[in-house]
Image: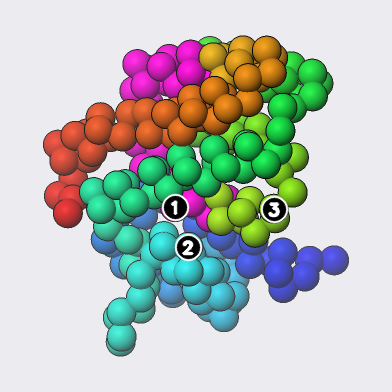
Amino acid sequence: MITQESLKSQIIKALWELIIEGKIMPNEPMREIQLSELLNISRTPLREAFQQLEWEGIVVSEARKGYRLAQFSEADILEIYPLRAKLESFALELSGVPTKKVLDELNAINLKLLNTKSPKEVVELDERWHLLLISNCPNKRLLKMIKTLHLQSQRYEYAYMAMKKTVEKSSNQHENIIHQLQNGQLLKATELLAENNVVGMDALINWLKSNYKIT
């Protein structure tokens, strides 16, 4: 049976696909009538999905105008990625050194990340790698905050992860983090994880400035 909560999750997933595919552009209105018809749903659960996305910073609402997809922002990038770096490093510190099984899985994901040609798959694999790395963190509130930051950064990542040099650099950093953990060097791994979270940030800002009017 599909619950109201799972329905909202399905709608959010469908909206994400439209955003990723460029069918809804930054600063573009999220038209309720057209979207409800496209997704074959009523407008009430659609609005609930919008409210969730607004809380996550993906869409913004305006009085008497409805919702629109949030504009790309340099300020967002400069806030989200350094914060991810701090929180993920702390989460890894709390998690401790992963088991051999987890380290092997991290290696396998990283290999797929390096070899895939799909920007969408790159983003999905990179997120999977990061969340698996800190999956043993006992602080659930911290993990929830990190997952929210991942959602907020995903739109940007679909833009810059298509750049092969960034993918290669990120993958090499992943490999080094795994190597440090295999040697029991947890502190060094947390430092490298912080660096990995901000890799490509300048390149991303420059890319957006050349393709979008960001502020």
User: Can you tell which mark lies on residue 56?
Assistant: 2
Whole-Å distance between the Cαs marked 2 and 3? 20 Å
In the depicted view, which residue is nearer to us: 10 or 143?
Answer: 143
Say which element carries label 1.
Answer: helix
Q: Does residue 108 appear in the picture of this structure?
A: no
Say which element carries label 3.
Answer: loop
Image spot of residue 61 (x, y percent): 35, 75
Dot 1 crowding, Cα within 10 Å, few <14, some 14–19, many 20+: some
Whole-Å distance between the Cαs marked 1 and 3? 20 Å
First in sequence: mark 1 or mark 3?
3
Type of amino acid under label 3: Asn
Query: Is residue 161 shown in magenta?
Result: yes
Q: Are marks 2 and 1 in contact (CB under 8 Å)?
A: yes
The correct choice, above or below, for 203 with respect to 29 in the image is above
Image spot of residue 132 (x, y percent): 68, 34
Q: Which residues are magenta?
A: 147-174
Which colour assignment does the render follow? rainbow
Type of amino acid under label 1: Gln
